[in-house]
Image: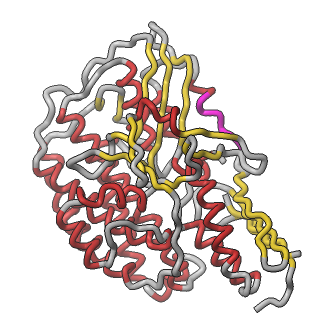
Amino acid sequence: MTHRSDRTLDVRALARVEGEGAMHVRVRGDAVEEVRLDIYEPPRFFEALLRGRRYTEPPDITARICGICPVAYQMSACAAIEDACAVTVEPGVAALRRLLYCGEWIESHTLHIYLLHAPDFLGYPSALELAKDRRDVVERGLALKKAGNEIVELLGGRAIHPVNVRVGGFYRTPARRELAPLREKLRTALDQALETVRWVAGFDFPDFHHDHEMLALVTPGQYAVESGGVATTAGLAFAVQRFEDHVIEEHVPHSTALHARLAGRGNYVVGPTARYTLNRQWLSPLALEAADAAGLGADCRNPYRSILVRAVETVFALDEAIRLIEQYEPPARPFVEVPPREAIGYGATEAPRGILFHRYGLDADGLITSARIVPPTSQNQAGIEDDLRRFVGSRLHLDDERLTWQCEQAIRNYDPCISCSTHFLDLTVERR
């Protein structure tokens, strides 16, 4: 316990998050004066790089923004370009896109659960240290991640930065016989995912809740993944085409990523807890049963339980992938032609970390005249800072080392992808 009234905590490089960032906390007496989530990773200027390129190139270029969720960038880019060109893909292609996205959810969620976040709950500094005592657990996580990788590799051409996705569909679609062996592997992985839900449900979750408005895609009748309209837990609903009317981005001095807020409403959060709260009723029966058995209620406002939601979503993604494979009928053509036209197109999909919005302006020759990309991590930044402010305020009795550890864990709840937001953790706690 510390008896100092004024102190500063600094974490200069956050561990077990994707990208580079820091945290600064300044405390005077019993009051938290300032909390900053500093994202100092250099801007990457992908939007500027896209201007002047052909309308067919965003799926391959934007996939390079992230090695963990490249499918999300490809799917949002395709959705936006196809919206601009007034093209709708055929149902068989849409089903393959959803299957590909399930692969990315499985590999990304499993990476976060086993290698980045579970060590926090179990008191280990890393998954490597966890593996020394629980090799079986870490091997289960790696096996699950491999199952997701295999989906992405089969449909995308390779596990990282897939190359088989194009505007209008795929360059090549698989035959039914190519998917059959994958189905058997996914059945084994599904058992491992159910065991994962039971495992994380036994973690000790701190008593902490937020009251942020939560935002996610909603597709009535199915759990939102690759399409849907936008909805919030406070009842706001709008089409993806009106995203920029409702989501306002602004620069802040301490971050190379933009902060986002809902116009006239304030901070909000996106990601698995938002997605679950707005879409729970459309989980598959098996995933819903797992959620109920794990104690997840109608909504989830404790960010620490996000690891449990990710485990349930992993069950869902595997269950959904098996369903899609069993019902698969190869489309007549791997893609539809997408003639360019002068227009603006909008697309949004549910990346593992939350809604990912793309907007492109095209000229009549199909050259990109404008581009805008709003990733989930930048949307969550203001909400994370607000959560940290309240979190630190109730834990000032902790010494600096313990408080720093808990703050880093609090940030990892959101699985921030800093490179995507361009823009993660070096903690400074300044006590005065």
Q: Position of residue 94 (x, y in %)?
A: 24, 37
In the image, the segment drawn in magenta is 42-47
**What residue is drawn where x is 39% and y is 69%?**
142
**What residue is drawn where x is 41% and y is 55%?**
233
**What residue is drawn where x is 73% and y is 82%?**
396
* Magenta segment main secondary structure: loop
Quadrant in which the N terminus is drawn: bottom right
Q: Count the marks: how many?
A: 0
Q: Position of residue 336 (x, y in %)?
A: 25, 22
Q: Is residue 121 magenta?
A: no
Determine whether, in the image, residue 9 is placed left or right of residue 214.
right
Q: Could one spot residue 358 in this view of the protein? A: yes
Q: Is residue 43 magenta?
A: yes
Determine whether, in the image, residue 24 is placed left or right of residue 246.
right
Q: Could one spot residue 353 in this view of the protein? A: no
The image's colouring method is: secondary structure
Q: Position of residue 306 (x, y in %)?
A: 44, 68
349 versus 214 height, above or below: above
Q: Position of residue 65 (x, y in %)?
A: 54, 41
Residue 87: image quadrant is top left
Residue 278: image quadrant is bottom left
373 or 20, nearer to the observer: 373
Determine whether, in the image, residue 86 is placed left or right of residue 213.
left
302 or 44, nearer to the observer: 302
Residue 248: image quadrant is top right
234 versus 136 height, above or below: above
424 or 150, nearer to the observer: 424
Quadrant in which the C terminus is drawn: bottom right
Determine whether, in the image, residue 375 is placed left or right of residue 30.
left
